[in-house]
Amino acid sequence: MNVVLSIAGSNSSGRTRIQANSKSLEAFNIFGTSSITVLTAQNTHGVKETYEVAAPFVKAQIEAVLSNFNVSAIKIGMLYSNEIIDMVRDVIAALNIPIVIDPLFISKDGSKLLNDNAIANLKTLFPYATVVMPNRFEAYELFGYEPKDPSTLHKMLKLPYRVLIKNEAIELNDRFSFSFAIAANLALGKTLTESIEISKNFISLGIQHAPNLGHSINPIAHEKYQLALN
C-alpha cells in the first residue's frame, strides 16, 4: 500500500484539512500519515480559534513518519509561520517524490491568514513542487493573476513550476480533498494530468452526494468515488 504524508492544519469539524486527508486517501486505497502545523476550533460556519504548533514539533512529526514509512508523495497545506516554512523547505529539498502544495494563506472570503513576509517565504517552496494549487485570491497575491486579464495568465505560463488554480466550486466545497486526491494519484504513479482528471471526477461525485451535516457548507461524500468504481 502506498503512503502519503500530509503537512497541514487540522479541522475539528472533520470537513477539511488533515481530517479530510484520511477520507480522500482511503478512497484511493492510500495510507495517510500526517504532521499537524496548526490546530483549529472549527465547524461548518468557520474557524473560532487557532493554536500554532511549534516548528520543532512539526519537524519531529515529519521525521517520525519519514524514518518509518516509505512515503510515495507529500501534500503540503497551511504552514502558518516562517519557522515552519523554513523547516519544511529543508525537508522537501532533500526528497525526490511528488509534492503537492495547496498554499492555504487566504481564506475563501479573501482574508489573509499569513503576514506578507511569510507569504513571500512560502514561494521558496514552489520550485520543489510537482504542482502548486492556490485559490484565486492566493493566485493574485502570489503571481498577480487576474481571471479577466489574459496577460497575467501568459506571465504565469513562464513560471518554472506548474500551477493549478482551483475554481470557486472546489474552493467553496473542499479544496483540501481535491489536492489530497491529486497527491494520492501521483503516489500511485499517475501523471499529473491523469491525477487532475481523476481528482476532478472524485470531487464532483463527492459534492453531488454531500451529506446534509452541520448548518452551513456540507462535507463532501468521499466514499462515493470508490462505490462508483465498484
Image: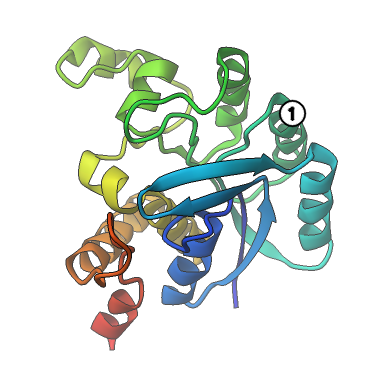
Residue in view at x 46 percent, y 24 percent: 112
User: Residue 146: x percent and y percent?
Assistant: 24, 17
Residue in view at x 28 percent, y 77 percent: 224
Picture layout, residue 227 above or below residue 125: below
Disc 1 residue crowd, few under 14, some 14–19, many 20+, Cα 10 Å: some
Residue in view at x 33 percent, y 57 percent: 194
Picture layout, residue 69 above or below residue 104: below
Picture layout, residue 122 above or below residue 71: above
Colour basis: rainbow
Residue nearest the observer in this picture, 32 or 83: 83
**Which quadrant holds residue 181?**
bottom left
Count of numbered badges drawn on the protein: 1
Residue nearest the observer in this picture, 68 or 186: 68
Q: Quadrant of the N terminus?
A: bottom right
Drawn side of residue 67 relative to residue 151, left or right: right
Residue under label 1, please give it.
Answer: 86
In the orientation shown, which residue stands out farthest toward the bottom? 230
Drawn side of residue 64 relative to residue 225, left or right: right
**Which quadrant holds residue 221?**
bottom left
User: Residue 204: x percent and y percent?
Assistant: 21, 61
Q: Is residue 190 visible?
A: no
Residue nearest the observer in this picture, 139 or 98: 139
Q: Quadrant of the C terminus?
A: bottom left
- Element type at mark 1: helix
Q: Residue flagged by tag 1: what amino acid is it?
A: Asp
**Which quadrant holds residue 217?**
bottom left
User: Residue 99: x percent and y percent?
Assistant: 56, 46
Drawn side of residue 60 relative to residue 42, left or right: right
